[in-house]
Amino acid sequence: MRIIAGTYKGRMLVTVRDLSIRPTTDRAKQTIFDILTHRIEFEDAEVLDLFAGSGSLGLEAISRGARSVTFVDKSRTSLAVLEQNVRTLRCETQCSIHQAEVFWFLKNTRRTFDIVFVDPPYRLDSIGKLPTAIYESGVLRPHSYVVMEHNKGSLIQISDEQYEALRKPFGQTIVLIMKPISLSQVSHVNLQKESA
């Protein structure tokens, strides 16, 4: 696993040696960041990385200019690997690491973010509740994007009153790129046109 672009391009990251952890592939990560680059300014962005694992997505954002990343994961093993990767890149001052259950964190944080990455375990029972939980938590800004990965077999219902959504398949993985549509009166890009 490596950093694809930016300040730390080519730097290798350690991953969690646990079959229950499924790091984002380089191909999926490249596509995610290609899509986001045309929609959001990474320079000085504030990022939330939920189910952070080894931190691949959040650290990629820092490499591309993000001001800060807040990492959340309840696994001590995952966080130990994440902390090692942060030390390797020497970006400690830009990282805030929280050992917490994601739904609890969403209910209790008072911060807002420009980008929210969500990479939950595929077998998470409450995976379908995540888009609404994020939307209702208050962590989103009018211009925010939410990027979520899930298995093809998971039924993730997206409320069209909350988000415009683009779905990108990668084998058995679906990447959802969601833009909140009710947080401001500004018009939004119709992401569905780009899924063709």
Image: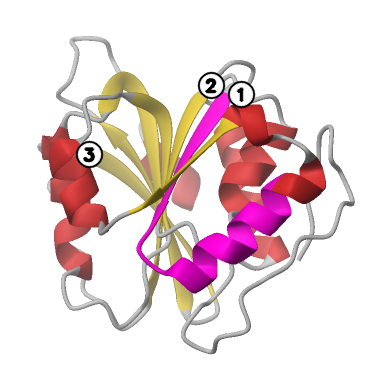
Residue 43 is situated, as x and y percent measured from the top left of the image, at 64, 17
Disc number lying in front (3 or 2): 2
Image quadrant in which the N terminus is located: bottom right
Q: Is residue 134 above or below residue 188?
A: below
Q: Residues within 10 Å of mark 2 (few under 14, many from 20)?
A: some
From the viewer's side, name the closer residue of 69 and 180.
Answer: 69
Name the colour scheme: secondary structure
Outermost residue to the right: 10
The residue under label 1 is 42
Say whether residue 76 is magenta.
Answer: yes
Please state the horizontal and vertical placement of residue 41, each as a whole percent of the image: 58, 19
Give the alpha-carbon distance from disc 1 to disc 3, as whole Å.
Answer: 21 Å
| Eye-nearest disc, 1 or 3 | 1
Q: Identify the residue under disc 2.
A: 45
Left or right placement of residue 147 versus residue 158 in this view: right
Judged from the image, the secondary structure of the residue bearing numbered disc 3 is strand
Instruction: Locate residue 119 relative to residue 2 in the image: left or right.
Output: left
Spatial separation of the CA atoms under disc 2 and disc 1 = 5 Å
> Percent from the top left, x then y, of residue 2?
79, 59
From the image, tell me which residue sits under label 3. 163
- Please provide the residue range marked out in magenta: 68-86
Give the Cα distance between marks 3 and 2: 20 Å
The kind of residue tagged 3 is Tyr
Number of marks in the rendered image? 3
The image shows residue 196 at horizontal and vertical percentages of 48, 53
Query: Is 73 within the magenta?
Result: yes
Residue count near mark 1 (Cα–Cα under 10 Å), binned few <14, some 14–19, many ≥20: many
Q: Are marks 2 and 1 in contact (CB under 8 Å)?
A: yes
Q: Earlier in the sequence, mark 3 or mark 2?
A: 2
Q: Is residue 158 visible?
A: no
Left or right of 102 in this view: 132: left
